[in-house]
Amino acid sequence: MGCVHGKCCSRYPSSSSDGDSGHHREKKPYKCKHILTQRSLQLVPVPSHNFTLQCSALTQHGYYPDTVERENQDSFCIKTQIQGNPNVHFFGVFDGHGQFGAQCSNFVKDRLIEMLSSDSTLLDDPRKAYNSAFLATNSELHNSEIDDTMSGTTAITVLVVGDTLYVANVGDSRAVMAVKDGDRLLAEDLSEDQTPFRKDECERVKLCGARVLSVDQVEGLKDPNIQDWGDEESQGGDPPRLWVPNGMYPGTAFTRSVGDSTAESIGVIAAPEIKVVRLTPNHLFFVVASDGVFEFLPSQTVVNMAAAYTDPRDACAAIAGESYKLWLDNENRTDDITIIIVQIKGLSNSGASATDGGVDSRPMVMRSIKGSLDMCSVSESETYSSVKSDFSDTQQSCQHSVSMNRSAAIVVPSPMRQRPLQLDVG
């Protein structure tokens, strides 16, 4: 949810045959790129703790009937082996907004990871390095040739350091972990949306001079003195936004971002909120996605849908397709939709140190290994490792494909590999 005029917004290839014969596909079913996401599976080993990350990503161009030529303003980054270290990996989604949102999104995507990669203190103090990288990237964007007066980007990022996740969030995109709890699968938010719905964020920006009002309030249709907007789920259609004291701008529905120099004057900041999570065998996968996904899908639903597919590419396609459909069911447009799903495979008790609540604020110190291969979004593994399935409840509620005639760009999961992720109970 971006500026008052909506998110300033890749089409996908058609689902036609990839040219291989049926016999060849049956013999080597996962050697080709996924027919919908056009990506191979990426396997990322974490040798320090003897587990593997299996991931895929998808970005879906939004549909804006008044500006059909507007480019996708979302971007994402999967960069492995940061600083040449095979145990350090980065996953990020950047949701641009405003007239120059796409430029802001791509600028921040590139510069943020460059700064993290060049910071010699990264492995000694990931929190400090993360905070410095966001603030420095914000300053560079202000001083760049990109006009970020009324444009910027949110950022949700996950840095994997051995068996520890450092989740840094600026804005209203989201990261969610799937946690096994007995025979249940629970969604644990790894980030908290930074919007005026949060009382702490609302009060912070007010102290900086922001007027916090919904569009109806700022236009005089509702009482501006009623400063109780309910929750985001029930009031998402007309959320509280930030306005300068004597103007009808910028109208941002988030309280933190990178860029947005005008909104910065009324309290919108680029400092990330950082959560640290020590992985355990109960952590099955995590999802990093723009708010184009979470506008109409709760975190638990996203986790349930992702668990219904063995192949994260199918899961990405199903979630993006459902998100797209729900946007058109509720509005006459869709937001850009971007999602990364990272499955955690082979993590055992001997390879992870659990702490109370799975959260550990201590940084993990690792020695950088020179000469390691950088696989960032370029070289992807074509090997598929299946997960046996017997998660019947999730399968019954979430195993479905989405099809629509409203847009040729809508993504639909392949039914052939629509098997749920198993919860090995006991």
Image (tube, grey):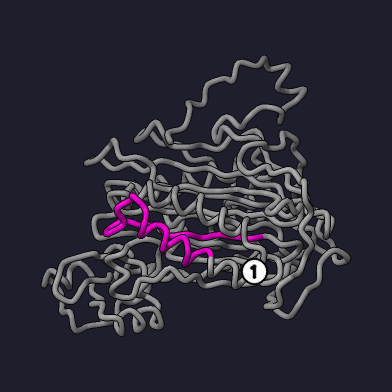
**x, y percent for residue 73:** 38, 46
Residue carrying label 1: 126
69 in relation to 389, above or below: above
Q: Is residue 205 magenta?
A: no
Query: Where's the C terminus, which quadrant?
Result: bottom right
Q: Quadrant of residue 314?
A: top right
The image position of residue 271, as x and y in percent, is 46, 71
Which quadrant of the structure image shows residue 115? bottom right
Extreme residue in the right direction: 350
Q: Amino acid at mark 1?
A: Pro
Which residue is drawn at the image coordinates 65% and 35% (left, top)? 40
Q: Residue sitting at 53 percent across and 68 percent down?
A: 132
Question: Nearest the camera: 414 or 47?
Answer: 47
Question: Residue 159 is drawn in which quadrant?
Answer: bottom right
Give the vertical position of 116 relative to 216 (above or below). Answer: above
Residue 277: percent from left, percent from top? 67, 70
Is any atom of residue 389 visible in this view? yes
Of helix, strand and loop, which one carries label 1?
A: helix
Q: Say few, some or many: other residues with alpha carbon within 10 Å of mark 1 (under 14 / 14 to 19 / 20 or more).
A: many
Residue 183 visible, this orientation: no
Locate residue 116 relative to residue 134 in the image: left or right. right
Q: Which residues are magenta?
A: 133-159
70 or 312, which is in the foreground? 70
Q: Residue at image x 49%, y 64%? A: 134
Relative side of 96 to 377, left or right: left
Give the mark count: 1
Q: Does residue 14 lie above or below 54 as drawn?
A: above
Residue positioned 62% across, 62% down in the render: 119
Left or right of residue 283, residue 243 in this image: left
> Can you say whether 3 is above or below 416 in the image?
below
